[in-house]
């Protein structure tokens, strides 16, 4: 009985130790967020902020480990690029971030522990709390990187690498204004063991409008605005966008360009160190 109790204690201790690096990062991050969110912004504060991000980067590198992604810099930095709560871009996915020149390609490498914590932090933003559901939601791709909204147009049927436990690819549009248009961004995300790898490529492919879906949009936008709704025009547009992207997802596989888009998504997934 004593032996069994000792084994249980060892298991608990091992689990606690495994979570310590991530918890240390989160504790440090939260202390800095509390500090800078109350600080008066000036040159000295900005210097301290840069030093804090550098420290967080060092902590992340310690437990995420070395990462090599084809086409991206070898050394990642904190993907949480601001610690001023309320700043534009605050709350990005915690992990090591990598970016090409002009941010045409961006990647984040994190752990399942940090991912689950981040999902909980965005619960009130409509973020699904189950990882698989989050990867299929536009909310994940919206909040993970950049300061721009993301509209998911279709999921892409990629082949999961043998060493990955999950792999998802989506086609969509990112921007700060109108999100209606031929989608060109491909985002892929995969899980291997405790490591989570996310890669987004803007202007990755060329697609085209789908007449049947344009018709759906026109019909939805022709509906009268609900006068009792204080944001009636926005609600109508949101509903039209939901119907439009649902149509696009259904019709996309039959389009002449779809096979090349899937091939591009698969090649993008192959850039990640999953083998």
Image (cartoon, rainbow, N blue to C red):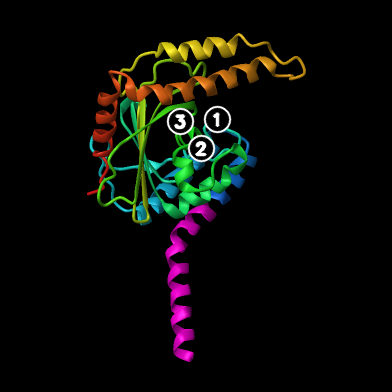
The residue at 45%/30% (across/down) is 146
**Numbered tag placed on residue 54 in the rendering:** none
Left or right: residue 16 compared with residue 202: right
Q: List the residue tagged with mark 1.
A: 88
Q: Are marks 2 and 1 in contact (CB under 8 Å)?
A: yes
User: On the rendered structure, is 72 left or right of 62?
Assistant: left
* Residue hosting label 2: 82
Query: In this rendering, does residue 58 appear at all?
Result: yes
Quarter of the image where one finds residue 183: top left
Q: Residues within 10 Å of mark 3 (few under 14, many from 20)?
A: some
State the image coordinates of residue 217 (x, y, percent, origin top left): 52, 13
- Residue 146's tag is 3
Q: How many marks?
A: 3
Up the image or down, 222 lies above or below 238; here it is above
Q: CA distance from mark 2 to mark 3?
A: 11 Å
Closer to the chain start, of discs 2 and 3, is 2
- x 39%, y 13%: residue: 209
Distance in Å between CA atoms under marks 1 and 3: 9 Å
Q: Which circle, 1 or 3, is nearer the viewer?
A: 3
Front residue of 198/207: it is 207
Of tags 2 and 3, which is closer to the observer?
A: 3
The residue closer to the viewer here, 263 or 186, is: 263
Tag 2, which secondary structure? loop
Query: What is the secondary structure assignment of the residue under circle 1?
Result: loop
Q: Position of residue 8 (x, y in %)?
A: 47, 79
Q: Looking at the image, which is closer to me, 107 or 183?
A: 183
Q: Residues within 10 Å of mark 1 (few under 14, many from 20)?
A: few
Q: CA distance from mark 2 to mark 1?
A: 8 Å
Q: Position of residue 20 (x, y in %)?
A: 46, 63
**Of label 1 and label 3, which has the lower sequence position?**
1
Relative to 255, say whether 21 is above or below: below
Q: Which residues are magenta?
A: 1-28
């Amino acid at each position: 009985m004593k032996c069994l109790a000792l084994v249980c204690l060892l298991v608990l201790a091992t689990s606690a130790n495994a979570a310590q690096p991530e918890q240390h990062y989160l504790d440090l991050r939260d202390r800095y967020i509390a500090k800078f969110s109350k600080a008066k912004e000036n040159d000295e504060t900005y210097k301290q902020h840069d030093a804090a991000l550098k420290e967080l980067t060092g902590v992340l590198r310690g437990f995420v480990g070395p990462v090599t992604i084809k086409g991206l810099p070898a050394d990642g930095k904190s993907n949480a690029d601001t610690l001023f709560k309320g700043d534009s871009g605050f709350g990005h996915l915690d992990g090591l971030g990598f970016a090409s020149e002009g941010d045409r390609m961006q990647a984040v490498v994190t752990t399942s522990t940090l991912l689950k914590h981040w999902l909980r932090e965005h619960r009130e933003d409509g973020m699904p709390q189950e990882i698989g559901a989050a990867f299929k939601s536009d909310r994940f791709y919206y909040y993970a990187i950049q300061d721009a909204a993301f509209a998911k147009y279709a999921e892409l049927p990629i082949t999961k690498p043998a060493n990955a436990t999950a792999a998802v690819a989506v086609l969509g549009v990112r921007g700060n204004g109108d999100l209606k248009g031929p989608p060109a961004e491909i985002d892929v995300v995969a899980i291997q063991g405790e490591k989570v790898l996310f890669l987004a490529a803007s202007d990755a492919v060329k697609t085209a409008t789908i007449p049947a879906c344009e018709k759906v949009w026109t019909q939805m936008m022709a509906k009268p605005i609900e006068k009792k709704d204080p944001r009636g025009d926005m609600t109508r547009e949101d509903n039209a966008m939901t119907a439009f992207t649902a149509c696009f997802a259904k019709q996309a596989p039959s389009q002449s360009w779809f096979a090349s888009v899937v091939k591009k998504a698969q090649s993008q997934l192959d850039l990640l160190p999953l083998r």
